[in-house]
Image: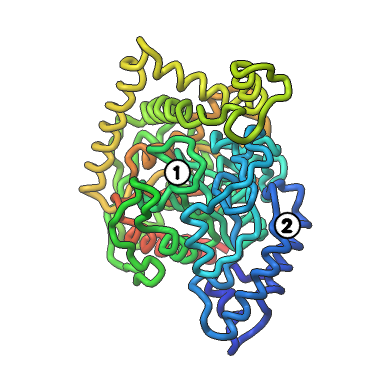
Amino acid sequence: MEGISSLSDIQSALSKQNQKFTLPVLVDYYLSRISEKQELNAFVEVFDHEARNQAILVQEKIDAGTAGKLAGMVIGIKDNICYQDHQVSASSRILENYVSPFSATVVVRLLAEDAIIIGRLNCDEFAMGASNESSFYGPVKNNADLSKVSGGSSGGSAVAVQAGLCLAALGTDTGGSVRQPAAFCGVVGLKPTYGRVSRHGIISYASSFDQVGPITNCVEDAAILLEIISGPDEYDSTASSKPVPYYSSENNSHKNLKIAYLSEALHSAGLDPEVKQAFEKSIAILKDAGHVVEPVSFELLEYVVPTYYILTMAEASSNLARYDGVHYGYRSNRSTDLESTYKTSRSEGFGPEVKRRIILGTFVLSAGYYDAYYAKAQKVRRLIRDKTNDILNKYDFIMLPTAPTPAFTIGEKSDDPVVNYLADIFTVQASLAGIPAISLPAGNNKNGLPLGIQFLGKRFGETELLNFSKTYCKLIDSDRIDSN
């Protein structure tokens, strides 16, 4: 199976005219890879028997010519995406052994097109983190260097694709949780426009930010996955009713574009020199290809992280109130009455990072502090959104590093949460503005760690963003070949 890294490759190999292997053989290959790479800790559960049985059924459809668009795609789902009659825990003790009675809309749509779900993937607890170190199941390790973090919170999803444990994965992106691990692992990570994809069946962290997004080896697979999982949903009133374009069949645009990059980002004190070098190289490559790439000022950059964390922690404190030891999930055996059930179950069930965010979120919503923090952050969010849209009215895309550094060492930042939060400095802008953004591989640093470049597009401008991403990837690949 070496060298096969896209759905089109797999579907070609599975076709009756060119059958190099069957789908059951492919599933067995991925299952063996998962077994070989257990040290990565990417999966919290593997659906081995179910995946094998599903492979037989889908292979019959392929042979009969009745298979869906995703036939041949073996995919993992983040452990905060509900799948009927399967456990889902958001990688938290408080949902230990919880079995979902229904499937998320994105899961229903994947299965309807004959994707095979091979397992659930490790993540930061309740998707709160940028390193996948807050998981109840332990950290996910980066396949490029086992001493490094995977990124978060969708670290298991990114590493599973990076290490070839499945073809693609679904993650969720609240403030960069698809894009940042994609950058750390050298794969493609897409955050759609808020409302493009239904949130029904997604365990909530911050409801006005959360979006499901694909992590893949190539832009083409991200496009077809987005096409399948997008669209209106009667179970989610925030899902847009806008028609879903045929992202997978849109022609690549070769016209020259105008791209802005934030001068404050390029001169940020925390920007790693090799990340800066890769970013400047990407600018030069795009200019050589005829695109206009210009610096613009975004004086609000220093406010994006505090604004994001005030708002998301406030929403988290509300969303996580439902985990009380009474309704479902973990219940402490030290409980003696209703009040002690709440206190002990939540104290024992939640990890330190989740408890920190609940406490801070409750604080910023409390009487006397609401106006000083939460209400003010909402106003700043509006300023950030308006300024971002103003730039996008003049340019086709905004260009940023995905993360200020390559993947860092496991445990390096765990003692200082503020330092960890600053890892989101370049990803939260798109989340605050509700616009689409994609992280694309941009080579490796001298130690072989992957680097990522991010592009932000106009609201519901995924078609243009994906088309341009294909162009960018070809330019980077050509430059790499020429350099060698």
Q: Nearer the viewer, residue 270 or 141?
A: 141
**Hey, what amino acid is under mark 1?**
Pro
The residue positioned farthest toward the bottom in the image shown: 17
The residue positioned farthest toward the right in the image shown: 36
SS assignment at label 2: helix
Crowding around mark 1 (Cα neighbors within 10 Å: few <14, some 14 to 19, many 20+) is many
Q: Nearer the viewer, residue 216 or 89?
A: 89
Q: Nearer the viewer, mark 2 or mark 1?
A: 2
Find residue 401 and name its label: 1
Find residue 34 and name its label: 2
Q: Position of residue 288 (x, y in %)?
A: 36, 60
Quadrant housing residue 24? bottom right
Q: Quadrant of the N terminus?
A: bottom right
**How far apart are the alpha carbons under marks 2 and 1?**
31 Å
**Hey, what amino acid is under mark 2?**
Ile
- Could you tell which of marks 2 and 1 lies nearer the N-terminus? 2
- 48 vs 152: above or below: below
Q: Position of residue 401 (x, y in %)?
A: 45, 43
- 463 vs 137: above or below: below
